Image (cartoon, rainbow, N blue to C red):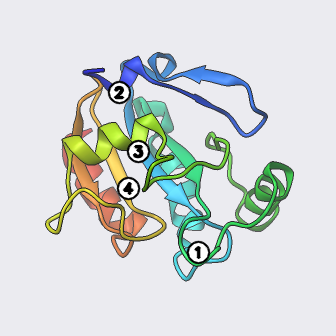
Amino acid sequence: MNNFYDFEAEDINSKPVKMSKYQGKLVLVVNTASHCGFTPQYEGLEKLYKDYKDKNFIILAFPCNQFAGQEPGSAEEILSFCKINYGVTFPIFNKINVNGKETHPIYNYLKTELPDKLGPRIKWNFTKFLIDQSGKPVKRFSPSDTPEKIETYLSKII
């Protein structure tokens, strides 16, 4: 697979979604967790989404329980948590693995295309990948990179 649009993932309701659905959009992929120190970033991510969604921008959240068990909930619990606590309206997908043998193919691809300074491994929740409108990963943001920092970057390219 040579392009982000070649992949597929299950949404939070276990329905398959082809990433080609987002063709032509600037896509921010984030591995998320409900019980993490970075969880309040959901608020900033939702604001970012609302501010830029009309400019062909979308955020895709991929819950992950691989970091200190910080996403233990079921799909229903994750969705409820995100909507009730942060008013999330961007797409949320089924829980996946981002490291190890069971890594979701999207994350294998993103990590290979944009490895971290210390290697491809995802270090923690809320690592973010920006994919351009042609499906090419162009920037990796660390968990500590806030949505406000990403907004500064987006404002220069949108």
Q: Amino acid at mark 3?
A: Leu
| Distance (Cα) linking label 1 and label 2 | 27 Å
In front: label 2 or label 3: 2
Q: Quadrant of residue 89?
A: top right
Q: Amino acid at mark 2?
A: Phe
Q: Which residue is mark 2?
A: 4
The reply, left or right, for residue 84 in relation to residue 106 is right
| Distance (Cα) linking label 4 and label 3 | 7 Å
The reply, left or right, for residue 43 in relation to residue 83 is left
| Distance (Cα) linking label 4 and label 2 | 14 Å
At mark 4, the secondary structure is strand
Q: Position of residue 47 (x, y in %)?
A: 54, 57
Which quarter of the rendered picture does the N terminus lie within? top left
Q: Nearer the viewer, residue 62 or 133?
A: 62
Sequence-wise, the earlier of marks 1 and 2 is: 2
Sequence-wise, the earlier of marks 4 and 3 is: 3
Q: Residues within 10 Å of mark 1 (few under 14, many from 20)?
A: some
Q: Which mark is residue 128?
A: 4
Q: Amino acid at mark 1?
A: Pro
Q: Which mark is residue 145?
A: none
Residue at 75% over, 32% down? 14
| Distance (Cα) linking label 2 and label 3 | 11 Å
At mark 2, the secondary structure is helix
Q: Amino acid at mark 4?
A: Lys
